Image (spheres, grey):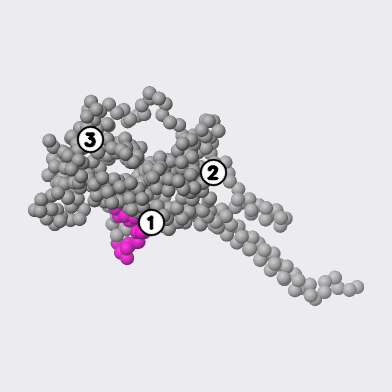
Amino acid sequence: MAQLFRPSSNVIAKLSIAFVLLLAGSLLAFAYIMDRGPWITSVQVAPEQPIYFSHKHHVKDDGIDCRYCHTTVENSSFANIPPTETCMTCHSQIWSNATATQPIRDSWSSGKSIEWQRVHKLPDFVYFNHSIHVNKGIGCSSCHGKVDEMPWVYKVATLNMNWCLNCHRDPAKFIRPKSEVFNVDYVYPANQAELGPQLVKEYHVQSLTDCVTCHR
Amino acid sequence: MLIGVVASLLFATACRQDMHVQPRYNPYAKTDFFGDGRSERPTIEDTVARGQLHIDQARFTGKIDGKDIDYFPIQITQADLQRGQERFNIYCSPCHGRLGNGHGMLVMRGLRQPPNYLDPRLVSAPVGHFFDVMTNGYGAMYSYASRVATDDRWRIAAYIRTLQMAENAPAPLAQQGANQPTTNTTAQPGTNGEPGGTAGGTK
């Protein structure tokens, strides 16, 4: 009777084990990459907006402060999207016949909202408050990146929980003087290791890492 | 089995549980309930939200019996002037310029040039006038009432007075201002601690 397995079966058996391990590994890697990549986190993805509104132009070229439009950021948990009135403050005079600004005038005359697409979304089980962050020395650009260089705004941070905790565990690394919070060009000084803990103490910043801080 | 693993892994990354999207309205959320599609509703007519009762005529309109007031209805300290400076630089300087001379960046871009605060008409205008302009708009300028809180508008008015004073300050006072630390120079006229400071319009 002939042998059931030929000698080459040994190789095939070893290879198939390697193949299964490799497949399992690459599936895990695939899942991880998908989870952390732009498909899930939307990082670097700029959603299409109803108007070609450029933050780069308005912030960098025109030098308009963040708070000119996002007026509630210092007092409210939510940083508002400006009403059409804010756009019209200038665009009733500048580019007042341009096609690019037509949706603003349509909204102004019809009273219908401009349907901006949201870029930074948090799941509903997370509580986040803008005002406490900007009033305690966490700058806009620490989370939103260099918005003054974004023609269309996109996310630079994943907003994943580990990203939040990265700062909540050690705010001294990311804190800046209150006067610099709205400075989009802020660069952390070389002595951040000394300045950080000093500011944390001065502003009474607590390292809040209880679950209930955000999941309330 | 492999297909099952692939499917479950895909679901593990892509699925969204109910807790993610809870049955409530987030800011600006869309709704089908109201005709205009907005979940945020305007105040119902003849209702007053808590803290929004505006009975102090002078403070909330800048006028008494239709005439601009020429005093500050809130106390103006040096801290208020600094707050006024900060608010001025955010909301006013794009057009009026940081010096209030009407050469703001947006004017360079084609917006109609606002008057210089050193215009004699504005130097002699009562402070209530500036408050009224900020509150109700004037000429090409839109109202800022929804963007700048009432008391902040008074602080800005105080800072405008400071700008007017700083330009016309006699040499010794200007010199004294120049010797102050940078954060204090612009608030110089308020340092005497008087309510309203010297920046207030006095008759």
- Mark 3, Cα crowd under 10 Å, few <14 / some 14-19 / many 20+, is many
Residue B77: tell me if it is visible. no
Q: Is residue A20 visible?
A: yes
**Residue linked to disc 1:** A60
Question: Furthest residue to the bottom?
Answer: A7
Callout 2 crowding tier (Cα within 10 Å): few <14, some 14–19, many ≥20: few
Callouts 3 and 2 close, C-beta under 8 Å: no
The stretch of residues the image draws in magenta is A169-194
Q: How many marks?
A: 3
Tag 2: amino acid: His
Depth check: A37 or B90 in front? B90
Q: Amino acid at mark 3?
A: Gly
Report which residue position mark 2 lands on. Answer: B20
Can you identify the residue that label 3 sits on?
B128
- Answer with left or right where residue A70 lies relative to residue A202: right
- Chain for numbered disc 3: B
x then y, percent, for residue B201: 16, 38
Q: Nearer the viewer, residue A99 or A70?
A: A99
Q: Secondary structure at mark 1?
A: helix
Picture quarter containing residue A21?
Answer: bottom right
Callout 1 amino acid: Lys
Establish whether labels 1 and 2 are both on one chain: no
In three-dimensional space, the C-alpha distance between marks 1 and 2, rounded to whole angstroms, equals 35 Å
Residue at the image point whose x is 23% and y is 25% from the top: B65
On screen, B147 above or below A199? Answer: above
Residue drawn at x 69%, y 68% is A18
Element type at marker 3? helix
